Each structure stands twice: as C-alpha cells, then as structure tokens.
Amino acid sequence: MTTSPERLARLARQHIETTRLLGVDFVPVAVRTRQHSDKAAALAALRAEHDATCPHCTNATAHTQTVFGDGDPNAALMFVGEAPGAEEDRQGVPFVGASGKKLNEMIKAMGFDRTTVYIANVLKARPPDNATPTPDEAAKCGPFLARQIDIIQPAVIVTLGKPAVSYLLDTRETMTNLRGRWFEYRGIPVMPTFHPAFLLRQYTPENRAKVWSDLKAAVERLQSLGRMPPQQGKFS
Ligand code: URA
C-alpha cells in the first residue's frame, strides 16, 4: 500500500505535536535517504515542521497557505526560485502562474518533464505585494530550503533570480556577474540564471540566449554526471 503525501504530512504533524507534548523541541529528519519513499516521507516531515515552526512563515500575513515544493523527491535537477506569487498561493504549488509557464517551457526545452524535476523557493509564504524576499526573510525561511536540498540531493541546482543565488551562495554579487558560471553549494554544482519573470519582462534575443546557454550548461553537466541521456533541447 502506498501512503499519500497528505497522510504522510498528517502523520508527521501528529508526530511533531506528540514529541512537543513530551518536551522535545526538534524533529530529526534523515539527511541522506536513498529510497524515493524515504525522501518523500522526509520531505513531508520537514514540511510539517516548517509549517509549525518557520520563523518567517508562521509570522507572515499576506498568504493563505504555504508553498513547500513540487516534483520528484529523487530529481537529478532542482530549480530554486524566490517566493510564491498569487497563483502559487492559491494552488499551493510553486511556479504555476505566468513565470511558471515560462519555467515549464525552459524545463521542456532542457529535455525534462516538470514531474521529473524538483522546484522550490527560498520563501514558502507569499510576500505582501509580491515583494522581493529580503536577506533577513531568506535567513529565517532559507534553512528549510537547505534541508530540502539535503534530502533531495540533486545532481545539479539551477537558481532562478538573485534572491535564490544570494541565499544559497551567500553572495551579494550581481546577476550579471553570477549567471552562466558554475558554483558549488555543499558539493552540489549550482548554475545561476535569470528568473523567468525577468525574461518575461525583458524578452530580448540576448536575454533568451543567455538563459538558454545557462540551461544548456546544466544539461551538459547532468549528462557528464550520467544523470541524463544525451539529447538536444530547443528553447524559444
Ligand atoms: N516566482 C517564484 O520565484 N516562485 C514561484 O513559485 C512563483 C513565481
């Protein structure tokens, strides 16, 4: 019998409540689980812990629900964005609005299906007026992203926009200086690229070419790591 994510989250929440009643104020989460179901369970437990304890999201006021992440817990490729927008807040799923449509195109052009990658954000609660996450907000919610990455252990991370790369690499460098270059986050190769919303706002041939070049580099890296069969993508 398979256990649904909702049931896993409910069990995890009950577990947290029970351990709290017993005076325990932390929840151990397996860091390097291997099986898909183990990773799904670890993510469900982390999600419940996040929703109960995140110092940013439990005090946020502009959201109706948290948006934890979406995709395959065993994904080789992980995308990290900024924060949920209005549509993401409505559906509880990251990147399902206009930026999400562009991201889906990018994922497809790379030769992936959205269900085979994993997508998360630095902040898991929608900021008021879609404001850009501040470093202070990222510092509060970001540790949960770090633990998501620890569980998933993707082969490659593509960061979308400045807040994601600033948080993961702890840098204040500009996107112009960062995009298109390889970095490492806890041993995982990181390719920073522009946010799909930026691409939609400034849809120039130059910007499209830059993003496609970054995504191609990620594909090549995955292929060299044996995590993706050789194939060609097409990005418009
Ligand atoms: N922009 C993001 O950075 N994340 C989302 O989930 C949606 C839009």
Image (spheres, helix red, strand yellow):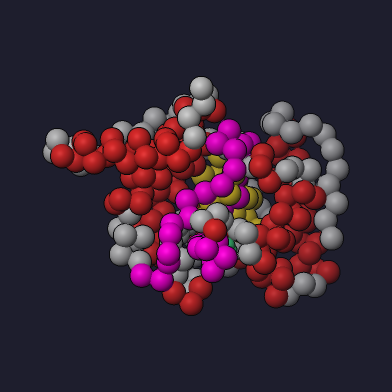
Q: Which residues are magenta?
A: 61-90
Please state which of residues 96 and 207 is positioned toward the viewer in this rendering: 96
Number of on-image labels: 0
Tell me the quarter of the picture where residue 154 sits.
Answer: top right
The picture places residue 236, in percent across and down from the top left corner, at 84, 60
Please say if 182 is above or below 174.
above
Residue 142 sits inside the magenta stretch? no
Q: Is residue 43 left or right of residue 71?
A: left
Q: Is residue 65 left or right of residue 174?
A: left
Residue 68 sits inside the magenta stretch? yes
The picture places residue 63, in percent across and down from the top left corner, at 42, 66
> Residue at coordinates 42% horizontally, 35% vertically from top-left?
8
- Residue 199 visible in the picture: yes
The picture places residue 86, in percent across and down from the top left corner, at 54, 69
Tell me the quarter of the picture where residue 156 sits.
Answer: top right
> Residue at coordinates 59% horizontally, 43% vertically from top-left?
71
The picture places residue 132, in percent across and down from the top left corner, at 49, 71
Q: Quadrant of ligand 1?
A: bottom right
- Residue 194 visible in the picture: no
Tell me the quarter of the picture where residue 21 sits.
Answer: top left
Q: Is residue 61 left or right of residue 119?
A: left
Q: Is residue 44 left or right of residue 216?
A: left
> Residue at coordinates 36% horizontally, 70% vertically from top-left?
61
Q: Main secondary structure of the magenta part?
A: loop
Instruction: Give the residue furthest to the front.
Output: 1
Please state which of residues 12 and 185 is positioned toward the viewer in this rendering: 12
> Residue at coordinates 77% horizontally, 72% vertically from top-left?
203
